[in-house]
């Protein structure tokens, strides 16, 4: 039997088991070729434009090389050893109850204040329903429908709104963009889709948390958010509880489109499992996030709090095409143990009078290495463009490092670009001062770190800000001294 | 003398490879205010840090009893929660951390230690506002970063504000008067005086007898070369003002 026939057979069997009803189902065997790409598209019942797009991406990817960054140390990923389709996980695989879950993980949930029923779901315990959130989610769905907002899984959008998907997919992050985005385009599993109709202010924060089936979107997630003229949306991604995943490699793509006078606020709090003290078992997180301010006076704002991941490679970016459009990037990234964070942003000023603000706060502890890499590019057309960049690093202990690489390309003489940078250490004087006021060393560290991150936290939606603060506290626990 | 709050016996301490405290003994009774004076570099701040438990200070001999307990066994934050307050000679800036937030955390840490519930947010603010008024501090200081960009005098007032809110049993004030203008000196002194109470004790480190006109001490000590070389009543301060330290330190050598 040929290899192709082999796959066909497997795919056929998978079909029998019924992917649509998403009960027990199979995975594709490890390996990647055109047949696998076709199989993924077929399993998901996609229209031909999407199958063709995936294939073009795959062909392009084959000729690409994995990027090498000076400040990242990564084990090479064997792309033929990955299975590119695994249907929703069998419930028999997970722990049967919370008693079987690593007590350390449970202790973390406790500290983060994760509700009891959520703990089970996050730890991968077989749970039958999404509990309360089902009813919560239905109420939300009603309100969103009334406003005309589309918020669903990517697969559902492909089925129900193929024209919208075809119109916008890959228009912000073309598959040729980079190695990981290209791979994602060929094999992406699922993700989220949002469309806000003209003039609509989305009546609530959209959070992946409230989307049923939000879990299991797999390692190649894809998100597309479109804000039609004059619309507003705030989108929350992620979860503060540590997520474990057997997939080491994660290569997501997020595309945002803001039309005239539209605003998108995209907030992320991410806490992938960083691996143990020796860096074993951590997740490699290579994400391409880009927003395009396509319309006049549109605005895209990225806010992110990143802890976790063995390796994070992430540059939420803005292409400021519309005249007078605004791009913002607020980020807190931590690197502890052997974590490596290589993050930053790109602000590409195309239109006249476009403005961008970058505030990056890097915290390094233990042996963590934190790199900020930012590009501010002012094209010849960007008359009167302005950028302000502030990059601050906080070091905890003496074995960690912080590196900043600000790149600036200015092709229009009327532009103004400002850059401020600082590196500080938590001083013993500060710690002792707090302790002399009765505050424990740990609380003192948390306070000082939160103070350092304040200008980013204040950009987060309220509840998220509190969670982010707790998350930071937990992830930096015991990292001084 | 009333029951001692603080009792130091033959204390010797090293810092940075130097023996700075060299057999220091001192008793401070409940309800008393003591002033410690002495030449620059004689060990006054070192004594305050040792009592507060600052890391890096090695106790090589002697003992310190605080309300009948071995103080040196306690961690710095435990000492604070047990009612020991140090007003720093050079208060540190903590950018981004709300002044009022730190104060509330400090108060709650002490309350937790006493088995009390967390302070009610409104009551807390009311108390803080009242004390700020007493210290003639603008309310804007509440929301600023801890000592962030404060002038020298403002930092000192902020120390006293914290003390007034925390109501410590033993307050060690290290040169709280230096850097204060004449009016501020009165304001700060008034603040300290409101804290005088039979169950408390205050130790003032100062270079100036002027402060002692506002806060009248029960005892005055001269610290030189790491030990108390002379003690007296407030007249000793006046005498020091007239004659300097040579006549005493010379005699002690
Ligand atoms: N970390 C250190 N390393 C080395 N020497 C130190 C250290 N800390 C204090 N000293 C020394 O110990 C001595 C006492 O210092 P301390 O600050 O206690 O003096 P002080 O009496 O408070 O002086 P002042 O009146 O100027 O405030 C000084 O000679 C000082 O240089
Ligand atoms: Mg001193």
Image (cartoon, grey):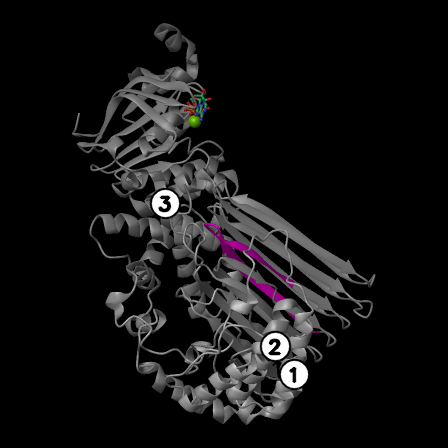
A328 over B34 or under it: above or below: below
> CB under 8 Å between callouts 2 and 3?
no
Dominant SS type (magenta)? strand
Q: Quadrant of ligand 2?
A: top left
Give the left or right position of residue A51, taking residue A143 as reference.
right
Q: Which residues are magenta?
A: A325-345
A341 over A44 or under it: above or below: above
Give the left or right position of residue A327, taking residue B42 as reference.
right
Whole-percent x, y for residue B25 in the image: 26, 20
Whole-percent x, y for residue B225 in the image: 38, 15
Residue A262's label in the rendered image is none
Whole-percent x, y for residue B39 in the image: 43, 18
A424 over A145 or under it: above or below: above
Residue A277: tell me if it is visible: yes
Q: Nearer the viewer, residue B159 or B60?
A: B60
Q: Which residue is mark 3?
A: A441
Distance between the alpha carbons at the discs numbered 2 and 1: 8 Å
Q: Say yes or no: labels 2 and 1 on the same chain.
A: yes
The nearer-to-camera label among 2 and 3 is 2
Label 1's element?
A: helix
Q: Nearer the viewer, residue B253 or B63?
A: B63
Q: Which residue is mark 2?
A: A185
Q: Chain of mark 2?
A: A
């Amino acid at each position: 039997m040929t290899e192709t026939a082999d796959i066909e057979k497997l795919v056929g069997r998978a079909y029998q088991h019924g992917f649509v009803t998403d009960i027990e189902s199979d995975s594709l065997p490890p390996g990647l070729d055109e047949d696998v790409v076709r199989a993924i598209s077929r399993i998901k019942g996609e229209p031909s434009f999407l199958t063709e797009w995936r294939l073009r991406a795959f062909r392009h990817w084959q000729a690409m090389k994995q990027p090498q960054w000076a400040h990242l140390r990564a084990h090479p990923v064997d792309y033929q050893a990955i299975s590119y389709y695994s249907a929703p996980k069998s419930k028999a695989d997970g722990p049967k109850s919370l008693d079987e879950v690593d007590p350390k993980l449970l202790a973390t949930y406790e500290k983060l204040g994760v509700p009891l029923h959520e703990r089970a779901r996050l730890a991968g315990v077989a749970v039958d329903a999404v509990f309360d959130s089902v009813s919560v989610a239905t109420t939300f769905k009603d309100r969103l429908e009334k406003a005309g907002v589309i918020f669903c899984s990517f697969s559902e959008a492909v089925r129900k709104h193929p024209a919208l998907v075809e119109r916008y997919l890959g228009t912000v992050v073309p598959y040729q963009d980079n190695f990981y985005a290209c791979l994602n385009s060929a094999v992406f599993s699922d993700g989220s889709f949002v469309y806000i109709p003209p003039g609509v202010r989305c009546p609530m924060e959209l959070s992946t948390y409230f989307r049923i089936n939000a879990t299991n979107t797999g390692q190649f997630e894809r998100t597309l958010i479109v804000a039609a003229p004059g619309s507003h949306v705030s989108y929350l991604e992620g979860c503060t509880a540590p997520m474990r995943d057997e997939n080491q490699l994660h290569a997501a793509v997020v595309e945002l489109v803001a039309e005239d006078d539209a605003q998108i606020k995209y907030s992320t709090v991410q806490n992938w499992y960083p691996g143990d003290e020796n860096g074993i078992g951590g997740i490699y997180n290579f994400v391409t996030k880009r927003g395009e301010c396509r319309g006049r006076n549109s605005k895209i704002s990225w806010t992110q709090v990143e802890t976790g991941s063995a390796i994070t490679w992430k540059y939420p970016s803005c292409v400021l095409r519309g005249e007078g459009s605004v791009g913002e990037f607020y980020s807190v990234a931590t690197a502890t143990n052997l974590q490596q964070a290589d993050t930053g942003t790109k602000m590409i000023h195309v239109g006249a009078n476009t403005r961008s603000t970058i505030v990056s706060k890097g915290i390094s502890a233990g042996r963590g290495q934190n790199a900020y890499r930012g590009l501010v590019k002012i094209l010849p057309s960007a008359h009167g463009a302005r950028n302000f960049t502030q990059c601050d690093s906080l070091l905890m202990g003496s074995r960690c490092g912080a590196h900043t690489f600000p790149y600036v390309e200015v092709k229009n003489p009327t532009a103004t670009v400002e850059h401020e940078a600082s590196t500080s250490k938590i001083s013993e004087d500060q710690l002792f001062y707090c302790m002399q006021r009765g505050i424990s060393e740990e609380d003192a560290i948390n306070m000082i770190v939160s103070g350092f991150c304040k200008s980013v936290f204040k950009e987060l939606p309220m509840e998220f800000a509190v969670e982010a603060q707790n998350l930071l506290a937990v992830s930096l626990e015991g990292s001084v001294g | 003398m009333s029951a001692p709050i603080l009792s130091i016996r033959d204390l010797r301490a090293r810092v940075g490879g130097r023996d700075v405290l060299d057999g220091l003994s001192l008793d401070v009774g409940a309800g008393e205010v003591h002033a410690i004076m002495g030449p620059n570099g004689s060990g006054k701040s070192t004594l305050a840090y040792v009592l507060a438990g600052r890391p890096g200070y090695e106790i090589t001999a002697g003992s310190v009893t605080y309300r009948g307990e071995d103080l040196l066994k306690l961690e710095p934050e435990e000492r604070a929660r047990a009612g020991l307050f140090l007003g720093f000679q050079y208060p540190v800036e903590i950018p981004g951390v709300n002044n009022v937030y730190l104060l509330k955390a400090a108060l709650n840490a002490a309350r937790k230690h006493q088995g009390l519930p967390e302070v009610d947010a409104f009551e807390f603010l009311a108390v803080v506002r009242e004390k700020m008024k007493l210290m003639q501090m603008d309310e804007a200081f509440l929301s600023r970063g801890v000592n962030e960009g404060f002038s020298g005098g403002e930092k000192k007032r902020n120390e006293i504000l914290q003390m007034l809110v925390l109501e410590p049993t033993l307050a060690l004030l290290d040169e709280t008067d230096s850097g204060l203008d004449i009016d501020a000196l009165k304001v700060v002194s008034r603040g300290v005086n409101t804290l005088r109470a039979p169950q408390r004790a205050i130790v003032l480190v100062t270079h100036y007898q002027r402060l002692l006109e506002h806060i009248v001490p029960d005892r005055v000590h001269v610290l030189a070369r790491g030990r108390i070389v002379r003690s007296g009543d407030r007249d000793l301060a006046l005498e020091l003002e007239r004659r300097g330290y040579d006549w005493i330190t010379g005699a002690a050598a």
